[in-house]
Amino acid sequence: MFYLTPFILLSQPHLLMKILRHTSICLMFTFLVSPVGLCQEVSPDKINFVRQGVQRMVFNEDQSLKLATLEPENMVGISVMHPTKHYLNTRSNVSLNNNKLVIKSGKKTETGIWFGGFNPFATYEIDLSSVRGEGSLGFKFSDAADKEQFFIKIGFRDSTLTGVNLRIVNKKGVIADKSIAVNVEKTAKVKGRIILQMLGSGCTLFLQDKGLPKVIGQADFNSYIDLRKKYYLQNFQSQLFVQLNNGEVQIKKVGMLFSTGIGLADIRAITYENGDPLLEQGRLWYTMSIRGRGLPHHIQGVFSMNPSVFDVKLEGVILFDRNDGLLRNEIASHIFYDRDNNIWRGITTGFSAYANPGKEKKQLLAIESKRDPRFGFSIMKAVPFGMVGDIEDPHIIFDPEANKWRMLACENQEGYKAIMLESNEWNKNYKPIAGPVKYNSTGTSIQSIGNTRYCFSGSSERKIYIYTYPDLEPAGNLKIDLPPWDQTSGTRVWPNIVQLPEGYPFPYVALMMDRLNYPGQKGPHWSYGALYLYHGYHN
């Protein structure tokens, strides 16, 4: 038998890294690699998770990714920077005054002021200074020749909100012109911040003066126009649209950005191919669904966090391309970096099928990208691989001891329940090898505690379950001080446990969410949640 000494491995660091990636054997020279508990076996039901902090990001301005802005205080040459179109013979007066954009007219006018390109999953904001008289304002999205036009408008009279309207025009004429108002009070004032959250096949409109933004409009428009088509990303542009009938609008700022939405959920650590967490630049990396309204209205976000503090940061947004002309907002993804092939891969859940009910089926998709998809705006290739049905929350690893790819997921079998699948290839031919478990499951994940892999699952049972890997035998419940629920709220959270290397003041960290929906949404919606940080300790 040939033995590798510590001195041989020190002289060949690439060999050391390969061994560390593909084995869970406790090395005798632990002084070389000494993560906390690397060779110490701890049962996960003996770990105490203690809540450290909580925060809910609601269109958090500090956590936005800027796409375009109109900033009156920084304009030099408005006619070039932000060209203006007048859509009626009578023209409004457009000027800059006191670091504000002023649109004024004594007669009926329609004015569009360009401020950026277009993304059907971006958030659009207007920071108002004042409105006077009668008219409407909002957003117009269209191609340069105005062959197709999409409007969201808020009506006002003497600063009182009079309505919220969706209008869609194509070469055939007006195909939609209707009220999308919800929760509008007769005395509501048009002031503060107007927020349009575009969600691919739908949208929600908010008005924020003090406190949380209030929902004042919502729509699903996919039966009229599918803005997820690549054509619209490439050809549409965005305008501030103001319609006046003897009135004036003063604006502080207009913006287009990727935002944190109204809640964050489906938290999954980005890993390497063997399931080890990706800890880079001193930060853990996560996928989270940026919440809109219902399904299919959420967006796949990428966040990072220094695990020693609570500084969650939006880093990027990912859409998915199935090579059918659409960009899809799939969520509940697990992304890993495959070091052997130098490529980013993963599995996502095809919730975008709900945008075309009766035409598409929900399924899991294999995703891939040569470019690092964590930063900015990314598009990953997505391919179906035969896992069609009500299955979600996939977590995939390569197990070097079994020489197999294994996937833990939740499948609806008289309720969502955890199952384990196995394949010789990462992106096809998965067969079940264990499960379904007895209890309701959500946010299924495979994590190492010490040198042993375990499976974790949230549930509707007011418990987070622990199972053995890979056979899914019961192994207890997670001990949590102040779990992310109370006696009235939902408990189907994502456990999302990560074991940390030596040097941190605690050996484990867990980032979870609650299931408290955002107020004011109409109809079925899944608009949770806040983020909860836990540190894990054992005796």
Image: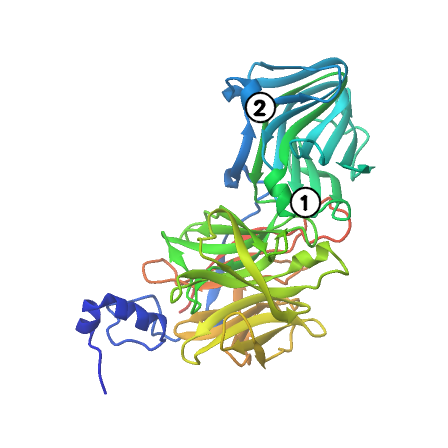
Q: Which residue is located at x 77 percent, y 22 percent? A: 135
Q: Which residue is located at x 52 percent, y 17 percent? A: 77
Give x and y (percent) for residue 56: 57, 46
Q: Which residue is located at x 45 percent, y 51 percent? A: 304
Query: Which residue does the numbered mark 2 point to in the structure image?
Result: 82
First along the sequence among labels 1 and 2? 2
> For this rendering, which residue is in front, 460 or 271?
271
Q: Say which element carries label 1.
A: loop
Q: Say which element carries label 2.
A: loop
> For this rendering, which residue is in front, 446 or 150?
150
Give x and y (percent) for residue 442: 61, 66
Residue 504 position by quadrant: bottom left
Question: Does 224 sit above or below residue 86?
Answer: below
Residue 24 falls left or right of residue 176: left
Query: Which residue does the numbered mark 1 point to in the structure image?
Result: 227
What amino acid is at disc 1? Leu
Q: Which residue is located at x 35 percent, y 62 percent? A: 501
Q: Say whether residue 6 is visible.
A: yes
Residue 251 falls left or right of residue 304: right
